């Protein structure tokens, strides 16, 4: 049994009695294991305590940043809601007016320089639309219905009437598929393809006036049919010889070419 025990002596300072304790060596072995485990556990606790401490230090920053993100998100949602409202409004306006938005700034500036809003014709075809005190006899109403003074498409004037340049009509830039209207009541004299003018409708207003609508994508009337002022007779296209979608609109009076802008009641 030698070597299996340790003897521990305790000598009190004020006593002559010596206390002896015998400890089995196995307990020292277990004590060593316990101390090793304790050191490992303490190291683990200290490491995690440090990591938790760092997290706690950054918590306030994280909380502040999160609050800012929540606020920004709310602002973004409000902006997106406004943008959605603007898109809805734009869509409604486009549906009502049948117009379009041009994204090319150079083209916009070019069109604005030549558009109808910057142009005041030197003379107009003067017509008393209301009559005396707003009353008109039926014959006068019928006569006015046959005068081609309604704008044939919602768009921008991109090329004006010019006898010098042999451009005997007015071009309106518009979006493909936009409706084209009869500028006055009359009878369809022609409805079909017409060489460089592409799909064309010609209306005889039975008063010396004849109007033509060219480069149509499709025709929604036929030869011999009576049409009313403002009735849809086709849609804007780019058929025939053209570089882009537009309506070429022309008016003749007793066979003489006239400037359409003199008649349009803007």
Image: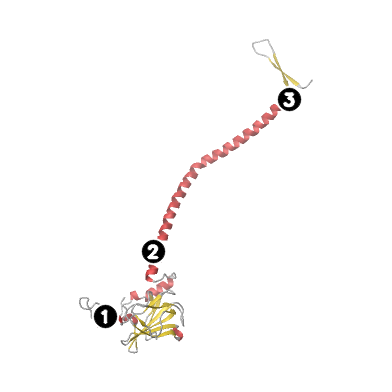
Total count of labels:
3
Q: Earlier in the sequence, mark 3 or mark 1?
A: 3
Instruction: Kindly identify which numbered label has been placed on residue 26.
Output: 3
The residue to which callout 1 is attached is 141
| Secondary structure of the residue carrying numbered label 3 | helix
> What is the crowding at mark 2: few (fewer than 14 residues within 10 Å), some, or many (at least 20)?
few
Residue found 41% across the figure and 72% down from its top: 108
> From what the image shows, is residue 246 above or below residue 38?
below
Q: Quadrant of residue 91?
A: bottom left
Question: Sequence order check: which comes first, mark 1 or mark 2?
Answer: 2
Does the image show residue 109? yes
Tags 3 and 2 touching, CB below 8 Å: no
Residue 124 showing in the rendered view: no
Q: Which residue is mark 2?
A: 89
Kindly report which numbered mark, 3 or 2, lies closer to the viewer in this rendering: 2
Residue at 74 percent across and 23 percent down: it is 25
């Amino acid at each position: 049994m030698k070597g299996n025990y340790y003897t521990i002596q305790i000598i009190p300072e004020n006593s002559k009695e010596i206390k002896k304790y015998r400890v089995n060596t196995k307990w020292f072995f277990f004590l060593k294991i316990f101390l090793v485990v304790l050191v490992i556990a303490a190291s683990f606790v200290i490491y995690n305590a440090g990591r938790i401490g760092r997290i706690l230090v950054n918590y306030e920053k994280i909380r502040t940043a999160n609050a800012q993100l929540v606020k920004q998100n709310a602002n973004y949602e409000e902006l997106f809601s406004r943008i959605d409202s603007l898109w809805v409004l734009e869509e409604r306006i486009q549906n009502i007016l049948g117009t379009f938005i041009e994204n090319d700034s150079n083209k916009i500036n070019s069109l604005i320089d030549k558009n109808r809003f910057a142009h005041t014709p030197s003379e107009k075809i003067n017509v008393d639309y209301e009559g005396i005190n707003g009353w008109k006899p039926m014959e006068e109403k019928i006569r006015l219905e046959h005068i081609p003074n309604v704008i044939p498409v919602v768009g921008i004037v991109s090329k004006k009437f010019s006898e010098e340049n042999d451009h005997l009509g007015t071009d309106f830039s518009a979006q493909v598929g936009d409706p084209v209207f009869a500028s006055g009541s009359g009878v369809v004299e022609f409805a079909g393809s017409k060489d460089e003018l592409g799909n064309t409708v010609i209306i005889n207003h039975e008063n010396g006036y004849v109007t033509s609508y060219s480069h149509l994508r499709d025709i929604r009337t036929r030869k011999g049919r009576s049409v009313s002022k403002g009735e849809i007779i086709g849609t804007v296209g780019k058929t025939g010889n053209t570089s882009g979608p537009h309506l070429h609109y022309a008016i003749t009076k007793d066979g003489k070419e006239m400037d359409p802008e003199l008649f349009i009641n803007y």
